[in-house]
Image (tube, grey):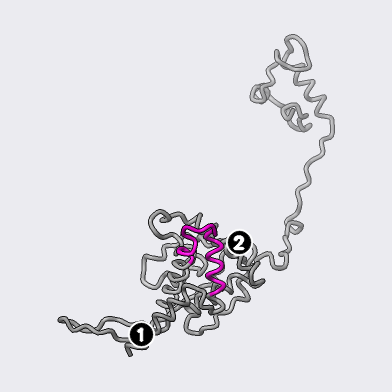
């Protein structure tokens, strides 16, 4: 046991030290009967003649770690890199946060993005997609469930397209945001609709809303899982296909606003 290791030659244990080590003379494990303290000290001093190997402490120079190439690169879920992501619409570059400081390992930063106007523009775009899935009351606050759905969605997208799924998500958001909308103008009973341009920030917000709504409606009362429906919606929207709910709604909004110019 550790307490029976021999003492160094230059240290002579006192009776207090022996008591702290629970080496009371009557309970000595190898010596029988009552043992005098002096004889016990002599026994320990004899045992102390044995040479003990001191642990070798590594020098500070040997402990320097060499950074492995690519080990510091941030990848979503440990798989999807952000370095090669390209935002092809120049007006949305500032509102689709997916590079630099906005690259995260998980779409769950627990940031307070609703405290100030426009602060949610700095929220990672994949996390914003996860947050839009937490709707319709019964899903409120279930962010871990939403993160798991997004993780499965990205895996399915990679199998369908053989591309980086984060790039597919970015392309889907760019294609799904309406560029023009119509608003109500007038008062006192005379109301007409006037076409207006949509801001880049609202385009991103509206695209996320349409994508999540389309996936939710497709998975309702269906054998398909939410992840499968969301993956299909994102892939169709990234391609600009009219099979996408978001693309249909975007075209409808732009058609109505065109007639109200």
Q: CA distance from mark 2 to mark 1?
A: 40 Å
Magenta-colored segment: predominant secondary structure: helix
Residue 236's tag is: none
Does residue 100 appear in this view? no
Mark 1 lies on a secondary structure that is helix
Q: Residue furthest top?
A: 33
Residue 178 location in percent, x, y? 42, 80
Task: Single out the mark in the foreground, 2 or 1.
Answer: 1
* Above/below status of 249 relative to 31: below
Which of 198 and 85 lies nearest the eye of the viewer?
198
Provide residue 172's location: percent of width, then percent of height: 52, 75
Q: Farthest residue in the left direction? A: 188
Question: Is 70 placed left or right of 175 in the picture?
Answer: right
Where, by quadrant of the figure, is residue 157 drawn? Answer: bottom right
- Dot 2, crowdedness within 10 Å: few (<14), some or many (≥20)? few
Indicate yes or no whether the magenta region holds residue 220.
Answer: yes
**Which one is nearer the viewer's eye here, 96 or 67?**
96
Of label 2 and label 1, which has the lower sequence position? 2
* Residue at screen point 64% across, 68% down: 158
Q: Which mark, residue 257?
A: 1
Q: Which range is magenta? A: 215-236
**Which residue matches tag 2?**
77
Residue at point 65% right, 22% down? 19
Q: Secondary structure at mark 2?
A: loop
Q: Quadrant of the N terminus?
A: top right
């Amino acid at each position: 046991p550790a307490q029976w290791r021999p003492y160094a030659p230059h240290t002579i244990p006192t009776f207090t030290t022996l008591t702290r080590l629970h080496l009371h003379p009557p309970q000595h494990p190898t010596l029988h009967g009552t043992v005098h303290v002096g004889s016990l000290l002599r026994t320990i001093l004899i045992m102390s003649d044995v040479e003990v190997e001191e642990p070798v402490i590594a020098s500070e120079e040997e402990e320097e770690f060499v950074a492995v190439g690519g080990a510091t690169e941030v990848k979503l879920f440990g798989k999807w890199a952000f370095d090669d992501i390209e935002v092809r619409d120049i007006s949305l570059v500032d509102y689709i946060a997916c590079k630099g400081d906005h690259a995260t390992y998980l779409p769950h930063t627990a940031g307070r993005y609703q405290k100030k106007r426009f602060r949610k523009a700095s929220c990672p775009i994949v996390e914003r997609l996860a947050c839009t899935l937490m709707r319709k009351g019964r899903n409120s606050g279930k962010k871990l469930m939403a993160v798991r759905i997004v993780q499965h969605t990205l895996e399915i997208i990679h199998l369908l397209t053989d591309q980086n799924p984060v790039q597919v998500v970015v392309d889907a958001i760019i294609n799904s945001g309406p560029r023009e909308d119509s608003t109500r103008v007038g008062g006192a009973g005379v109301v007409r609709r006037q076409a207006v341009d949509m801001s880049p920030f609202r385009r991103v917000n509206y695209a996320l809303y349409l994508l999540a709504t389309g996936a939710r409606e497709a998975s309702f009362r269906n054998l398909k899982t939410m992840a499968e429906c969301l993956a299909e919606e994102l892939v169709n929207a990234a391609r600009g296909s009219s099979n996408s709910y978001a693309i249909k709604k975007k075209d409808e909004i732009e058609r109505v606003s065109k007639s109200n110019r």
